[in-house]
Amino acid sequence: MSTSTPKKFAVLLKPRPSQPALDRAAQYARMNPDFDIVAVRIINEYAEADDKEQIKVKEEAEFERLRRSYSVDNISFKLIFNHDVAEGFIKECSEGGYDLAVISANKRNAIKDLFISNIDSSIMRKSEIPVLVVREAAGQSVLGGAVVLAIDFLEVAHSKKLDEILFESASSFAKSFDGELHVANCIVPRSAGTMRGNISESRIVGGGIASPQDVTNKLAVEFSKKHGVPMDHVHVLQGRVDEEIPRLCKKLNARMVCMGTTPRSSFFGSVNSSASELVLDQIHGDVFIVNAATLK
């Protein structure tokens, strides 16, 4: 997986006029003509007896009308037939040499789907390449604005390799947007350092049982020094993840949050129980996700 600036984007088209993911990709394409944007349309409702060539001609004509509205040359179209939309898109992302998958987020009504649909959830969890989730493209086309890198230093499955990939990606986005990089960690009150978190990290504070606050502060300072991030750009928050991360994003006018997913990620756990959907639901910018399980 490339850790430099993404060059080839796979954009999942929605079966409706509104296309936030393609809107965002088109904005990137205008900023950098070297980007290769591929709009992927998955046809999932079809019979084997259907005339696929006829469907293809119709879809290509509709896309051409859409493409002309963007006035961007470096956007192409790919049609895929697959009864499982997520499976078809993930397969294309894996086999097509892409650096980044871009999908639109849907506001859902059910409690368990406050932020994401089953299709979006599957893509975020199974994609072998980073995923950019776009809420609304409007209002984020201007340069500037913070990029927030959310890292849980105390998470059991904390991956330093994931940290490095996220840092490089977040730095690249910040540079592209002429914005500032900020690092955020949220200490959940009910975590006493023994309920979750890497207890072995306590040794670095020396002697006795260190509080999650002390351990996190120490790790935050180390991360700041290692990556050259000013300490006033490193935020150790205390409170509910779904309240504190969005609050920081609003304060910083953040255009994007970068986060990783791990088997026991406090930022992105199971669909039914994690606060992450609430986090994402309240963030007005984009969310960039790297799945630790797919790191080679």
Image (cartoon, rainbow, N blue to C red):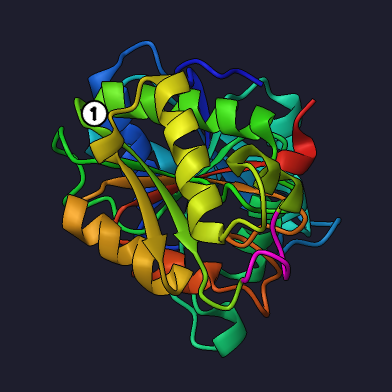
**Residues rendered magenta in the picture:** 192-197
Q: Is residue 70 shown left or right of residue 88? A: left
What residue occupies the far front of the structure in this picture?
207
Frontmost residue, 104 versus 165: 165
Give coordinates of residue 19: x percent, y percent.
Answer: 37, 53
Q: Is residue 85 shown left or right of residue 132? A: right
- Label 1 sits on residue: 177
Residue drawn 34% across the image and 27% down it = 229
Give coordinates of residue 190: x percent, y percent.
Answer: 58, 78
Helix, strand or loop under label 1: helix
Quadrant that contains the N terminus: top right
Query: Chief secondary structure of the magenta span?
Result: loop
**Residue 261 makes an appearance in the image:** yes
Residue drawn 67% across the image and 72% down it = 271
Residue drawn 48% across the image and 21% down it = 6
Query: Across the whole image, how many numbered discs are drawn on residues?
Result: 1
